[in-house]
Image: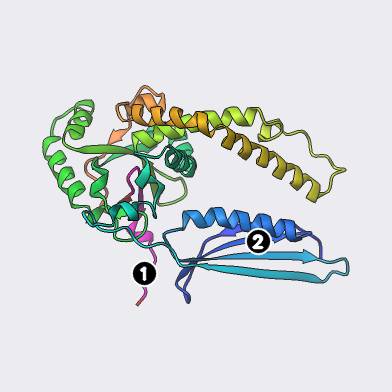
Amino acid sequence: MTRSRIRRRSCPLHETEELYWLIEAKGGDVGLRRLREGWAQLASGSKALGAYGHRTILVGASVRPDDDLFLTIDHDLHPGQAPLAPAGSDTDDEAAGLGNLEDRLGDSDDALIGAARAQMLAYLALSSAPVSQLRTVPVAADRASRRRRSGLTTPLEDDSLTLALRADARGAATGTEQHALRVGIRSMGLDDFLSCRIPGTEVHLGMSRKLFAACERLHEEDLAIARRTPGLRAEDQPPADLELSDEAQEEQRLTQRRIFREQQEEARPRLRPLLRDAYERGAASDWSDLLRRPQEPELDLEGDESLLEAATPETYVAVSRYDLPPARA
């Protein structure tokens, strides 16, 4: 048996326990330090699933010199957080502090930084997609109207305000030029979120102008930090040192990432006003300006009946209803 490194994280839904399982596996010369790293990674993933009951599982596998396999499995149960209260309830303020970071973007610069960082992959997918693959979808501009009964998102088929405003917009759209139509729907109380189907999937992800602008500024700042961290970017890494063991090379990579994260935290006081300014300015920006391209993505008022849509205050997700597994009895 040869020694190999295992680094695998997944989050399947366990059918018997009816909970998500967040799994991290470590392989090779696994000691207490590697296991602590694994728990730290699981803790980060657990925050993203905070509103859902889930179990974190850490697997450590080592091969001893006599080719014996030594395996450890540790797990912890996270019951999840209470769902947000309905609009108008006395517990609205308390509930908003439990769930999504986006519930606190208006009064917390740190929540804005956290939300932008959490949505960075979605931002990169949207900003790099050809305009022909992008569209904008209308969602009610009043974020307070999307109060969730459970989880992190509001199914838009349950958002009566968005449905009513979309119907009004379709009625007023006949013969209207796209730019005038965008201005018109914003005056009607709609905001158009940028959206794109992720290649190879039937998942559509999107976000608002304000969050897109904040992500753009944070990405610029992170790139500047990466350029100042020797060897962090793939294009800056020297040729592999064959004299170093796999464990030593992994230690180098962990050190580089630690330095990068420390510099991110050191930059936080400076980032707060920068991201806040970008977030506020984004509300009045055209998508062509935010994307730095001459043409605007198509505004989709007709919708796609095959999609199930949902939204948070600043993000959008849709999936094909035909690709969902059948409901369990």
From what the image shows, is residue 231 above or below residue 88? above
In the figure, is residue 220 to the left or right of 192? right
From what the image shows, is residue 185 above or below residue 66? above
Residue 138 x %, y %: 25, 41
Of residue 135 and residue 31, the one placed in the foreground of this image is 31
Q: Nearer the viewer, mark 1 or mark 2?
A: 2
- Check whether the beta carbons of the residues at disc 1 and disc 2 lie within 8 A of each other: no
- What residue is shown at x 49% (from left), y 32% (from top)? 218
Q: In 3D space, how far apart are the residues under numbered discs 1 and 2 (Cα atoms)?
A: 30 Å
**Viewport quadrant of the N terminus:** bottom right
The reply to whether residue 260 is in sight is yes
Q: Amino acid at mark 2?
A: Ala
Which label was assigned to residue 25?
2
- Few, some or many C-alpha atoms within 10 Å of disc 2 (few <14, some 14-19, many ≥20)? some
Element type where label 1 sits in the image: loop
Q: Which residue is mark 1?
A: 326
The reply to whether residue 307 is in sight is no
Range of residues picked out in magenta: 312-328
In the figure, is residue 88 to the left or right of 246? left
